[in-house]
Image (cartoon, grey):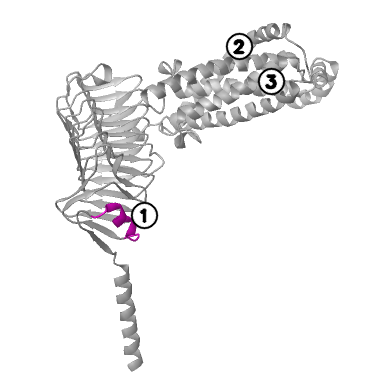
C-alpha cells in the first residue's frame, strides 16, 4: 500500500513538472526597452508582451514566438525604415499590436502558419501588411492613413507554393489597392475596404481566390477585380457605386474580370459608373465556381491542332531556309577543323535545353487547358521570375543553334545528310529568332509593369500558353531533326532510300502483305 501511494506521488510530481515546463515563458517588455534585444533574448515558444507606451522598432522575429500588446502599446518607427515588424519564422502569433510608420508596416516573408490578429497599422508608406512567399491568417486587422498614392493595404504575393492565406474581418481605408493578391492562393472574407483609387479587392496575376461577404465603399476604378489568368469565386459581396478612374477595367466597374481570367458571381450586389460587371480580353464570368471548370481531356483536340499547325509552319519555314543557308555559306571562309571543336558541344547544349524547355511547356499546357489551373507554371516557373527564366532558356537555345549554323557557314561538314540537316537548322534559327523577339517584348513588359506573366506580341491576340507551346514544339522538332540528319551517315540514308525503291523491298514485304490479306 505504501509503495502504491509513493508511486502515485511520484507520478503526480512528474505530471506537475511537465505541466509547469510546458507553459510558455512570458517576457514583459516595458516601454523604452530595446525591442529587438528583448525578442532575441526570448526563447523559442515564449510570449513577448508589450506593456503600454511607445516601443521603438524595427523588430525581426526569426523563431516561433507569440508577440502580444497591452492596450496603449505602440510599436513606432521612422518613415524611412523598411519594415516595422518582419516575420521570417513559422508558427508566429502577433496579437493586438499597433504599428506606426515604416515603408511596410508588417512583413511576413518565407514563413507559414503565421497569425496576425487584431493588429493595427497606421502611417505606412507602401504596405500596411505584406505576405511574400509565405502564408498567414490575418484577422481583425485595421490599415489606415497610408502615405503613398500607390499604397496597398494588404498584399499577398508569390505565394502559390504555400497554403492559402486568409484575410478576414479586417478594415482597409485608402490606398491604390485595398486587399490584393499576386500569384497566390487566398481567401478574403467579411472585410471592409473604403476609399481605394484603383481596385478595392483584387485577385490577380494567376492567383486562385475566394472573396466572400466583403463590403466596398467610396471606391474608384473597380470594386472587385479578377485579372491576369486568375480564377476567382465571388459571393455575397456588396460593392457600392464605384467611380471612374481610367479606361477599360478601371472605368468604374462593380466587378472587372480581365485578361483570360475566370470568375463566378453568386448573390453579389455590384454597382459602378460603368456597370456592375465588365469582362475584358477573353475573360469569362459564370454562375459556377471556376474551380469546378476545366475542359479536361476535351482540350486535347485544341492541343493537337496547335501541334499540327506548328509542324505546318515548320515545314513552310524549312522550305525557304535552305536557300538562306546556301547564300550565307557561299562567300564564307572555309576552315573545317576550326568550327568542329565548338559546333557539336553547342549543338548538344542547345538540344538539351530545348528538350527540358519543351517539357516545361507541355506541363503548362496540361495544367492550364486540361487540369484547369492557370496559376501553375511548368517545373521551374512557379519558383522563379517566369519572364527571366524563359528569356534565358530561349537565349541559350538560340546561341547554341546559331553557333552550329555559323560553323556550317565556315565549313564544318557533318558526316550525315547535309541537305536535310541544313534546311531544318535554318528553320530552327528563323523560328527561334522570332521566339526571342516575343520573349524580349515580354521581358520589357515585365520590367515596365511588374506583371509575372506578360502577353508579348502575338500573345495579346491568341492563347498565350498554346502559342508558346507551338513555337517550342516546332523549334524542338527542327533542332532534333537537324541533329539526327547530321548524325546519320549519308551512306546509311542512301542505302535506306535505295531499299525503299528497289525490288528487294517487294520481296521483303510480300509475306507481310499475304499475312494481312489472309
Task: Identify the residue shown where x is 30% and y is 52%.
Answer: 36
Determine crowd level at label 1: few under 14, some 14-19, many 20+ residues with C-alpha closer than 10 A.
some
Which mark is drawn over residue 317? 2
* Residue labelled with disc 1: 63
- Asked whether the beta carbons under mark 3 and mark 2 sit within 8 Å of each other, the answer is no
Q: Position of residue 98 (x, y in %)?
A: 19, 46
Which mark is drawn over residue 482? 3
User: Which segment is the magenta one?
Assistant: 33-45
Which image quadrant is residue 204 in?
Answer: top left
> Where is 122 relative to 406, above or below?
below
Task: Identify the residue shown where x is 76% and y is 15%.
Answer: 411
User: Is residue 463 among the parts visible in the rendering?
Assistant: no
The N terminus - image quarter: bottom left
Specify which label sits upstream in the sequence, 2 or 1: 1
Residue nearest the viewer, comparing 125 with 311? 125
- Which of discs 2 and 1 lies nearer the camera? The answer is 1
Amino acid at each position: 500500500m505504501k509503495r502504491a501511494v509513493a508511486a502515485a506521488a511520484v507520478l503526480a510530481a512528474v505530471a506537475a513538472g511537465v505541466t509547469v515546463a510546458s507553459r510558455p515563458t512570458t517576457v514583459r517588455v516595458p516601454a523604452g526597452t530595446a525591442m529587438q534585444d528583448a525578442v532575441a533574448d526570448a526563447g523559442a515558444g515564449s510570449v513577448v508582451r508589450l506593456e503600454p507606451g511607445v516601443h521603438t522598432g524595427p523588430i525581426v522575429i526569426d523563431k516561433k514566438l507569440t508577440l502580444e500588446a497591452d492596450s496603449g502599446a505602440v510599436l513606432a518607427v521612422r518613415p524611412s525604415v523598411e519594415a516595422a515588424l518582419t516575420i521570417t519564422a513559422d508558427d508566429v502569433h502577433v496579437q493586438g499590436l499597433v504599428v506606426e510608420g515604416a515603408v511596410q508596416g508588417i512583413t511576413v516573408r518565407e514563413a507559414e502558419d503565421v497569425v496576425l490578429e487584431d493588429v493595427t497599422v497606421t502611417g505606412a508608406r507602401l504596405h500596411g501588411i505584406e505576405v511574400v512567399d509565405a502564408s498567414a491568417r490575418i484577422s481583425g486587422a485595421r490599415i489606415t492613413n497610408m502615405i503613398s498614392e500607390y499604397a496597398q493595404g494588404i498584399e499577398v504575393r508569390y505565394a502559390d507554393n504555400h497554403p492559402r492565406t486568409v484575410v478576414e474581418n479586417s478594415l482597409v481605408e485608402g490606398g491604390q489597392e485595398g486587399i490584393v493578391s499576386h500569384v497566390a492562393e487566398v481567401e478574403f472574407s467579411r472585410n471592409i475596404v473604403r476609399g481605394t483609387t484603383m481596385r478595392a479587392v483584387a485577385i490577380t496575376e494567376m492567383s486562385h481566390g475566394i472573396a466572400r461577404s466583403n463590403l466596398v465603399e467610396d471606391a474608384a476604378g473597380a470594386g472587385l477585380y479578377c485579372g491576369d489568368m486568375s480564377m476567382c469565386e465571388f459571393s455575397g459581396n456588396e460593392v457600392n457605386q464605384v467611380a471612374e478612374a481610367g479606361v477599360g477595367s478601371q472605368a468604374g466597374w462593380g466587378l472587372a474580370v480581365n485578361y483570360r481570367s475566370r470568375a463566378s458571381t453568386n448573390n453579389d450586389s455590384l454597382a459602378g459608373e460603368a456597370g456592375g460587371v465588365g469582362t475584358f480580353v477573353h475573360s469569362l464570368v459564370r454562375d459556377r465556381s471556376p474551380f469546378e471548370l476545366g475542359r479536361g481531356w476535351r482540350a486535347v483536340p485544341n492541343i493537337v491542332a496547335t501541334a499540327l499547325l506548328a509542324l505546318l509552319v515548320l515545314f513552310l519555314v524549312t522550305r525557304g531556309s535552305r536557300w538562306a543557308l546556301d547564300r550565307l555559306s557561299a562567300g564564307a571562309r572555309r576552315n573545317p577543323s576550326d568550327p568542329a571543336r565548338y559546333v557539336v558541344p553547342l549543338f548538344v547544349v542547345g538540344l538539351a535545353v530545348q528538350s527540358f524547355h519543351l517539357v516545361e511547356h507541355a506541363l503548362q499546357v496540361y495544367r492550364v487547358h486540361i487540369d484547369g489551373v492557370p496559376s501553375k507554371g511548368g517545373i521551374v516557373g512557379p519558383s522563379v521570375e517566369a519572364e527571366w527564366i524563359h528569356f534565358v532558356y530561349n537565349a541559350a537555345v538560340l546561341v547554341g543553334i546559331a553557333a552550329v549554323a555559323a560553323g556550317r557557314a565556315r565549313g564544318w561538314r557533318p558526316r550525315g545528310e547535309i541537305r536535310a540537316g541544313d534546311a531544318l537548322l535554318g528553320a530552327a534559327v528563323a523560328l527561334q529568332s522570332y521566339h526571342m523577339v516575343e520573349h524580349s517584348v515580354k521581358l520589357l513588359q515585365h520590367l515596365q509593369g511588374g506583371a509575372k506573366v506578360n502577353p508579348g506580341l502575338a500573345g495579346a491576340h491568341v492563347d498565350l500558353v498554346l502559342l508558346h507551346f507551338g513555337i517550342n514544339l516546332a523549334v524542338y522538332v527542327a533542332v532534333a531533326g537537324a541533329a539526327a540528319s547530321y548524325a546519320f551517315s549519308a551512306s546509311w540514308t542512301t542505302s535506306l532510300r535505295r531499299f525503299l525503291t528497289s525490288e528487294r523491298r517487294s520481296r521483303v514485304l510480300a509475306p507481310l502483305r499475304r499475312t494481312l490479306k489472309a
